Image: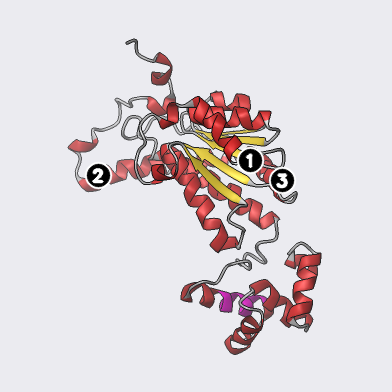
Amino acid sequence: MEPDKSIERLDTEMWDSSAPWLESLSTEQMLKVMNQADQQVPIIVGEQIPEIARAIDLIVEQLRRNGRLFYVGAGTSGRLGIVDAAECPPTFNTDPSMIQAIIAGGENAWKEAVEGAEDDFGAGEDVVVRYGINGNDVVVGLSASGRTPFVLGALQNSQRLQAYTISVSCNPGPELARYSHVAIVVPTGSEAIMGSTRLKAGTATKLVVNMLSTGAMIRLGKTYHNLMVDVKATNVKLKERAHRMVMLAANVDYQRAARLLEESDYEVKTAILMEILKIDTVQARELLLEHGGMLDKLI
């Protein structure tokens, strides 16, 4: 069996022989080396902001057409997509179908490795068909290497199905770019432990998906004055957060905020609008519906 020379040429697979051997250091020294390497990641991500902004604008355009956003990945990248998709409904009160995640190997792969799943190009092609991906949707391929076959198959077939495609990778010149309307390339370089892309590459991917979903939700009116006004208040912490948001946005005390939230069934936007415009729950909901939930357009 011949070695795959293309893999060893990837920056994320390089061995940094000049770095100190981590096992020879004290725990504190070891962590300082890792932390110093991590500090470069936000800077590298920042250099890709123009492409990330393009991606967000594309996502917003499709979501406004009732399209969906899908993250597709394998291993660490796939799990990061799952985390981001899972956090959107409670944070922004999105329908669970709006932002979804697909991981190579299926649902069990989020908690344990499914050997060989990431190498299955055909499975990537098939999965986008199973999810009914079409021209209204956006598919974001997540792959540190930029060449994961499962993700390549998913992006290629998504384009064939007329969906818009975005890729996030951590090596220069990724193969994913060939099948991406927007290619976000964050070259994080070699890892503290050779090939362990759950480290810098994983951090970079997490930062980018944070920007993609949060930026899109802001553009869709899910925030007001940097307040999480579409939050789904399902526990004590979130209900208290809802009280504070109404207090801040509507300039009322806790008792008044509590009454407004009770009347509006803990819909923060509705409660704020009721107070500021001096209207009832029904009127507030109608106005929000007419204006696409954009609170800033009504106040």
- Residue 271 is situated, as x and y percent measured from the top left of the image, at 68, 78
Q: Which of marks 3 and 1 is in front?
A: 1
Earlier in the chain: of badge 2 and badge 1, it is: 2
Q: Residue furthest bottom?
A: 255
Q: What element carries label 3?
A: helix
Element under disc 2: helix
Label 2: which residue?
29
Disc on the earlier residue, 3 or 2: 2
The numbered mark at residue 132 is: 1
Q: Looking at numbered disc 2 in the image, what kind of residue is underneath it?
A: Gln
Q: Residue, x 38% and y 26% (percent of image)? A: 13
State yes or no: discs 2 and 1 in contact (Cβ < 8 Å). Answer: no
The local secondary structure at tag 1 comes to loop
Q: How many badges with numbers are in the image?
A: 3
Q: What residue type is labelled 3?
A: Gln
Residue highlighted by disc 3: 62
Instruction: Between residue 126 and residue 5, name the one nearer to us.
Output: 126
- Please determine whether, in this image, residue 153 is positioned above or below residue 198: above
Q: Residue 165 at x, y = what percent?
A: 64, 35
* Residue 146 in view here: no
Q: In which quarter of the image is residue 174?
A: top right
Q: Distance between the residues labelled 3 and 1?
A: 15 Å
Work out whether residue 160 can be spotted: yes
| Stretch in magenta | 242-249
Question: Which residue lies at the image location 45% right of the left edge and 41% below the top edge?
Answer: 106
Determine which quarter of the picture holds residue 113. top left
Query: Which of pointers 3 and 1 lies earlier in the amino acid sequence?
Result: 3
